[in-house]
Amino acid sequence: MKILQNFLIIVWFYIHSILSTVEESDEEKFPKSILETIPGLKMEKYIEIYKLSNSSDQTFFTFFYEENSMNSRKSIPIISSLEKKLGLLVKFLKYDCTGNLENIDICRKVNLTDGFPRIAIYSPPEFRINPYTKKLNYHTEVIFKETKFSEIHIYNFITKHIVSHVTKLTTDNIEDFLKY
């Protein structure tokens, strides 16, 4: 009886050690609650993105995601890291496409089965008012289309589309600068 008891204990430890080394599934690694950790201002409707971007001279980074997309979940750490690095230069927005059938074309990347996440930059115009027509210029949407999805690729994509409003000081404009 004692031998059987010892044998069962050894078998139990063996099975337990095997089960504890089994790799977690993606569902366990990236639970749905991780979607709540996506940085940025949550947009409920696409028109909100349009209105917000065109009421400001700031560059907007928009992360379109879907709850059931593993690609969306796997990209959250990258987006969080980029927000920490670029959060003062770019406003981060997030848009949940889960069950949003009216805007499904806006949400999905072109030519992909799992089109998530979709990433877009809303870049402000160089001049808010067109100097020739005197009409308002709007933000330009630039979609991330690269096949490689890494932090450095997205970082380069974002920084490439930040519009610089810097004016070089010269003897002609230094007096105006010093007035303020």
Image: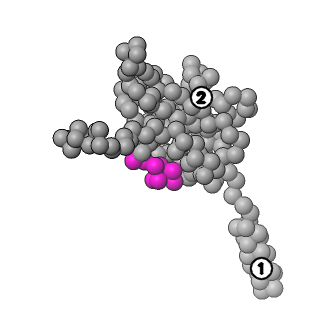
User: What kind of residue is marked 1?
Assistant: Ile
Residue extending farthest bottom: 2
Residue at the spot x=59%, y=28% of the render?
A: 107
**Who is closer to the viewer here, 160 or 72?**
160
**Can residue 41 be seen here?**
no
Q: Was residue 96 drawn as part of the magenta stretch in this picture?
A: no
Label 2 Cα neighbours within 10 Å, binned few <14 / some 14-19 / many ≥20: many
Image height of 85 relative to 8, above or below: above
Residue at the spot x=71%, y=41% of the render?
A: 147
In this figure, which residue is indicated by the disc labeled 1?
A: 10
Residue extending farthest left: 179
Image height of 130 relative to 92, above or below: above
Image height of 10 relative to 40, above or below: below
Q: Which residues are magenta?
A: 81-88
**Can residue 107 be seen here?**
yes
Label 1 Cα neighbours within 10 Å, binned few <14 / some 14-19 / many ≥20: few
Mark 2 lies on a secondary structure that is: helix
Q: Main secondary structure of the magenta part?
A: helix
Q: Where residue 172 appears, x then y in whole percent? A: 29, 38
On the rendered structure, is 177 left or right of 53? Answer: left
In this figure, which residue is indicated by the disc labeled 2?
A: 107
| Quadrant, the N terminus | bottom right
Q: Where residue 140 appears, x then y in whole percent? A: 51, 27
